[in-house]
Image (tube, grey):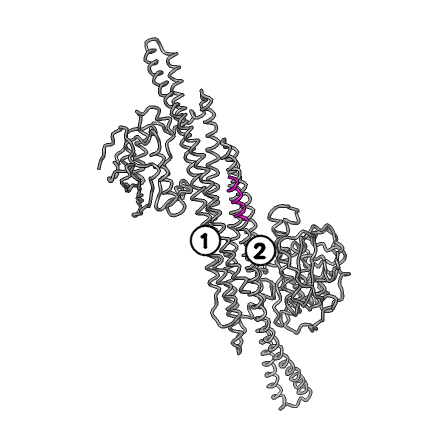
Amino acid sequence: MADTARDAPPEQTDFHELEDGEELFPEPATTQESQPASLAAEDISTNSNGPKQDSLFDDDPEDLFAEATEEVSLDSPERDVLLSDGPSPAITPITPPTSVITPRIGHTHDDMFTHSSFDEIEEEEGGDSFDIHISVSDPEKVGEYMTSMSLFKRNEFAVKRRFSDFLGLHSKLASKYLHIGYIVPPAPEKSIVGMTKVKVGKEDQSSNEFVEKRRSALERYLMRTVKHPILLKDPDVLQFLESSELPRAVSTQALSSAGLLRMVNKAADAVNKMTIKMNESDAWFEEKQQHFENLDVQLRKLHTSVESLVCHRKELSVNTAQFAKSAAMLGNSEDHTALSRALSQLAEVEEKIDQLHQDQANADFYLFSELLGDYVRLLTAVKGVFDHRMKTWQKWQDSQMLLQKKREAEAKLQFTNKPDKLQQAKDEIKELEGKVQQGERDFEQISKTIRKEVSRFEKERVKDFKTIIIKYLESLVQTQQQVNKTVSDIFHHN
Amino acid sequence: MMEEVKETASVLSVHDDSIKVTEVLKEGDTLTFIIVSQKLSGTGEYHVDRTYEDFEWLQQHLFSQGDVPGIQGVIFPPLPAKPQVNASPRSIKQLGFLALGECQPYCKALETFLQQVAAHSILSKNKAVEVFLTSSDPPGRQKVKKNIFNRLSQAVEEMRKEGHKDVDEFFQNERDHNLILTGCTKTAAEKFLDVVATEQKIAVACGHFSTALHLCVEPGEDPDKQAFSRVCVKLSEVFESIKKNMTSVAENNVNTLGLGLDLESRYQEAEREMLFRRTCKLVELENAQRNVEKAKPVKKAAMEEVKKAAETEFEHTSGVAKQEIARFQGARVEMLQQALVGWCEKQLLTAKESADQFNQHLEVFRGMA
């Protein structure tokens, strides 16, 4: 499963996490219909999704969660979806509606951290699919279920989406594509603490930061998803980006139980991994796996390093502000006019520099820390894809072994006088042969897909890093120049 | 080697502003400072080596000039706290800015101390100063006799006198003002120290990040791998630059504003001590006056004598104090302004250098795309 390795808390927490994390902002409590029994322990009041959930089930045939909300238990139909390795519903490449693709070049991707408009995702699609720019703007408190707003401006769509919608999208994509080898970008994480603060209406620094962090993460998530040539064409993605209303209820319940199931799944995976001894005939895969293991370790180290840096920068900002205050006090107490003025100016300068430090800390954080975090999570998806390949291989092997046994059994049956049993055996063998062939095809297909995906991933990785680094350097240069200007102003005053 | 230092006045034979503490030698736990000063006669310079104990010796001698009239009114240049090779956290805290860096801030502080002593009209006349700066032998280490500072213990009754109302408005104002300024300066110095400490932490963190990036470099022919490795190496260089920048900024802060605030803070304390001594003299005088009034006729004359002596001392002290205060106010303003200007200049320079470097890195990255 593509979801992050960190996202495997004990079941109670997971349920609870979703509850608080699903919406950016809560709706007033409404009575819950079809609240599944197994979710009774949750805080119902916040799990409000507005109008009846049932009615919102579109008949999306590919939406395997359609029936999930009725009763979610470990035996629900969706379980099969998550745990089985069976073939996914056919992925029919869908040509994007022509109205959407019109050349519209040169619109710079908006600055990730400043947005003033309210709760919408704006997207402009232009040129070929690689020119899609997505910006997620500032969320606003939604008092009730909002009617959505869409701006049609020459292929510009603005839609309102809740956090749970993003999670739902990811869930759908993961179930469709992961096990055939596509690296599906993981969705941002839920966070109880952050969400609680926001819900309570706390208007302080940390809750603002949380909202901003989430907004930025959602934006990156969408960008990564649409950059993927296959995912872009997926109808769920298109629906997400364009349609004014999404069936929301689906995600919620499905995800809470999905969370639990994911956990079970992961445990099973871990056990499986230990027992699957694959005969790796392809050195490429072995090497790549090692490579990704190493990369994972390194990125985590880098991530820790950057977080410590961000922490210190924030500290610096605080200390500078305090010093500015003390310098101001000193200036006020000072009798000598010129000195007093100079000290006050010093205080001003330090305050400005404090602001610059804060901005720099933000840059450090949003650019590097989040990038590294994203990649650590992406790598989990990559590793998952490799694991699926192993599973596919295993299935193939299992089919082969079963076929072998059946053949032996059939051979024995030849000498007995049980024609119908013999026939049955022959039928089974035929079926199994088909399965074996399919298994082999699947394995080859997934191997091929993975190769392509890995290659694309590596290229994207380099590009991603370079882009971020350039942005970072630009911010560094700018900060320095501003420090320069600020200090030289005081200098020339004296 | 015991050298008898006679308490006779002498003239200092070196230029006070030429005194430099050029280096410090570490031998185990002992620190030895090399002090160089230029002869007034222009015929060369004196090189002497002194330990911290020698500085204390000098200070003791300065304090014990009981026969110099009004000596209590002198604002004694403050000697920095004792440095330690393997400093305890408490001593580091006590030293503040002077504990940072290799030894440069501390040496500068010692240097300033010596320059101020040598430039002081009253203090420079003490032979001990001449001996300290010029004698090739280390000055004596014997305990000096009781001095004014020994007398003034930190006893609680003594502290109570600090709030004693003054008879002179000028001095009352000065005392009040000094009280406020001492507090503010101390706070500002502490906060600034925090800033510098954090800057140093950032420099270290950048260093770590830079090293971690190097670990991401992978060997191999794969073009994507190579591309990523290149990116990592270049980014590592960027963070080295950031580290250098931060280190410079921190150093600049210490050497200009840091030292300035530290000196100002210690000097305010010195003024406070002087004002306190004068206040004590005032209390003495007022006591003596009361004693005269209360005294029985037999004792009255004696009391009168005591009162006269106290009066004289108080007047001398106040006279010197007034001069000292005027000089001090002028000197500190100049010192602080210099510190501020120096700070601006250094920061501007560093900022320009850093901006250039970052621009260079930026161009490299743009070119790589």
Along the line of sight, the residue nearer the viewer: A457 or B342: B342
Q: Nearer the viewer, mark 1 or mark 2?
A: 1
Magenta span has A264? Answer: no
Magenta span has A490? Answer: yes
Q: Height in image: B145 above or below A493?
A: above
The residue under label 1 is B244
Instruction: Classify 10 Å Cα crowding around label 1: few (below 14), some (14-19), many (20 and above).
Output: some
Instruction: Classify 10 Å Cα crowding around label 2: few (below 14), some (14-19), many (20 and above).
Output: many
Pinpoint residue A342: horizontal percent, then vertical percent: 51, 37
* SS for callout 1: helix
The residue under label 2 is A366
* SS for callout 2: helix
Q: Name the chain letter of the residue that bears numbered label 1.
A: B
Q: Amino acid at mark 2?
A: Tyr
The boundaries of the magenta stretch are A482-494
Pinpoint residue A425: horizontal percent, then vertical percent: 65, 85
Q: Amino acid at mark 1?
A: Lys
Q: Height in image: B20 above or below A92?
A: above
Q: Is the magenta region chiefly helix, strand or loop?
A: helix
Pinpoint residue B368: horizontal percent, then vertical percent: 53, 65
Q: Is residue A490 visible?
A: yes
Residue B163 image-quadrant placement: top left
